[in-house]
Each structure stands twice: as C-alpha cells, then as structure tokens.
Image (spheres, rainbow, N blue to C red):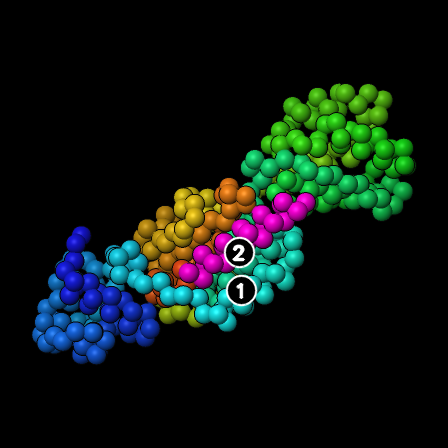
Amino acid sequence: MELSERKQKILGAVVEQYIKTGEPVGSKALLNALDFSVSSATVRNEMAELVSMGFLEQPHTSAGRIPTNEGYRYYVDHLMVNSTIDESVRRRIEAGIHSAGSDPEKLIEKAGAVLAELTDCAAVSTTPSGEGASIKRIEAVPVGTHTAMIVLLTSTGVLKSKVCRSDTDLSASVIEKFYNVVKTSFIGLPLSSVDTAMMQSLVASLGSDVFTLMPLVTVISDLAQDALRTEIVLGGQSNLLHYSNYYGNSAYELLEFLRRGEPLSKLLSSVSSQDGVEVRIGSENPYRQLMKSSVIVSNYNIDGSKRGSIGIIGPTRIDYAKLIPSVKFLTNLVGEMLTKTFNDE
C-alpha cells in the first residue's frame, strides 16, 4: 500500500518514538519529533487515517497510537535507515567471537552469548549443517587397555568424539587394522553415506576381525550421525522477562516454546535469505507463541554455501535499525571464521 510522504514521516516517527519510550504516541509528542511544520489537527487526521489503513492502533480510547505489525513491516521495508555499528560494539563482537577459538560448535555457542548480551533478546543459532559434508579425519586415542576415544573431523570443521569400550584388548595391531579400515572405507565419504546399508556391507567385509573391530566402527557410525544433525543453540531467554509485552502466561508459553528444539529448528531452516537478514514480525511467524515477537535471522555461509543461521527473538518493539546491522555483522564474521577454519584444516 502506497503512503504519501507526510504519512510515511508520521508513521516512521510514531514507530521510532514507541520503540524508544514504550508509551503510546500522541499528536503533541509527535509534533516535536517531525522535521516539518504542520498543525496538530492535521497530525491527528493523518494518524486516524493510518489507523484505518491498519498501520497504527489505539490501545485505549484516550491514549495515543502504537504501531501494528503492519506498521512495523512498512517501517522496516520502506522507512528504516540502518544505523552503523558503533566501533565499541564492533570490537566487543570481534573480541567475543575470537575468544571461542576454531571449534565450530564453541564458536556458534559464543556467538549466541555475545548476541544475547548486546541485544537484550534471546539468541538462537544452529551449528553448521552436516549436509554435503564428508569425513576428513578419524583418530583413535587409547585411554586404557579396552578403551579408546574415537575422534571424527568433518570437511566443515565439525569435531565429534565418543569413548569406545571393547571386550578385547585394543592392542597396537588392532589399532593398525582399525586405521586401515578407516582409510579404505571412511575417509572422504559423505556423512550421509554412513547408513545402515553401508555399515552392513562393511561389517560383512571384516571377516575374522569383525568382533575386534565392530565396537570401533560402530562408534564411527554414531559420530557420523551426530555430525550430520544440526543442533539448536539457545541463550539469553531470561532477557525476554524484562519486557512488558510478555506478561502472565505469554511469558511462560514463550519460554516453553524456546525450550523445545524442533519448532526453532523448523523456523530457522525456513529462512531463505542467502546474504541478507530476514525479519519476521508478529503474525508473520508460523507459531502462536511468537505472535508478540519479532525474529531477526541471518544465514552464515562456509565457502559460499549456507551452513547455518544466527538470530534473535524479542518483542515487536525492538530497535530494528540498530539490531539488524549487528546480527548481519556477527553472522558474516562467524561465516568468515568458519571458512578460514575449514580451509586451514
């Protein structure tokens, strides 16, 4: 829907005032925020028309106006001017992210913690997807006569490990046979190919070594399945309790929703934006528990391919102009660091 320039300026001023104060915006307060001269009566008439058009609403008869979801959407799409990231914020993001080292899962967890602290929202992210990844390295580290730690590294830098316990002695000769099987059957194999049929074929080929090597190769299969799964990392949920938007049962329902991983996984996997940021406001989200929330999500890429998502969940009354650039900057930085880790391996 097209709006006149005056209506656009009034709508933008209402959104920005409400984001700043959390109080309904009246015509008198709006006059002080506008950069053009107009009468109070004209402002009231324009606000009334914006109400009838669905961009503003009046929560109480004697109150000022507040943005609707449609008002926020129009603001984000047409009126908002993205602010630049403050240099101190940029340094905090970089310092926080670099402190995580090169482990992809720790990096994603740290990114979420940094984002939750900076935005005062809940941060949600996914670990790098194992889709399209292959097995790059497998190590067996003996920790006892019958025990070894099996470590699997993927082509996307994801590291998984699990203790393997065997009824037989894991001697040097057994470990050597294990590495021969790893070299011929696992290295370079896509994670998705380590399935039941592949394992049955492998076990059948082990011959007399089947009982000795079976526990070790079974652990590899478990690790490959773990690496293939995308995990949800959540942080800063308690930040949401600071907002009056979430009162009574709505706060409890939202926190319970966030605790369940599957809906969040579906929500993040549906984000289509390859290089930018996707903003979903209120009812644009597919879940009832998010009707009072906005979700800002950006995908991170590893070597140019989408591997995961990072974003925030907060009330619809959040500072979009400030938070969108922060989410995008952090996501791009995570993608750059994961790409470097992948290429350095």
Q: Quadrant of residue 290?
A: bottom left
Q: Position of residue 38 (x, y in %)?
A: 12, 74
Q: Along the line of sight, which residue is nearer the eye, 316 or 136?
A: 136
Q: Along the line of sight, which residue is nearer the eye, 319 or 331?
A: 331
The amino acid type, in three-letter code, at marker 1 is Ile
Q: Position of residue 8 (x, y in %)?
A: 19, 63
The crowding category of the residue bearing disc 2, from other C-alpha atoms within 10 Å (few below 14, some 14 to 19, many at least 20), is some
In the rendered structure, which segment of residues is drawn in magenta? 325-345
- Residue at which label 2 appears: 333
The amino acid type, in three-letter code, at marker 2 is Leu
Residue 59 in sight from this viewpoint: no
Q: Are marks 1 and 2 in contact (CB under 8 Å)?
A: yes
**345 up-or-down from 37: above or below:** above
Q: Position of residue 63 (x, y in %)?
A: 20, 74
Residue at 66 percent across and 30 percent down: it is 189
16 in magenta: no
For the residues labelled 1 and 2, the Cα–Cα distance comes to 9 Å
Describe residue 180's horizontal placement relative to residue 334 as left or right.
Answer: right
In primary-sequence order, the first of circles 1 and 2 is 1
**230 up-or-down from 110: above or below:** above
Residue 36 in sight from this viewpoint: yes
Q: Position of residue 216 (x, y in %)?
A: 78, 35
Q: Main secondary structure of the magenta part?
A: helix
334 in magenta: yes
Residue at 16 percent across and 58 percent down: it is 3
- Residue at which label 1 appears: 93
Q: Quadrant of residue 148?
A: top right
Label 2 sits on a secondary structure element that is helix
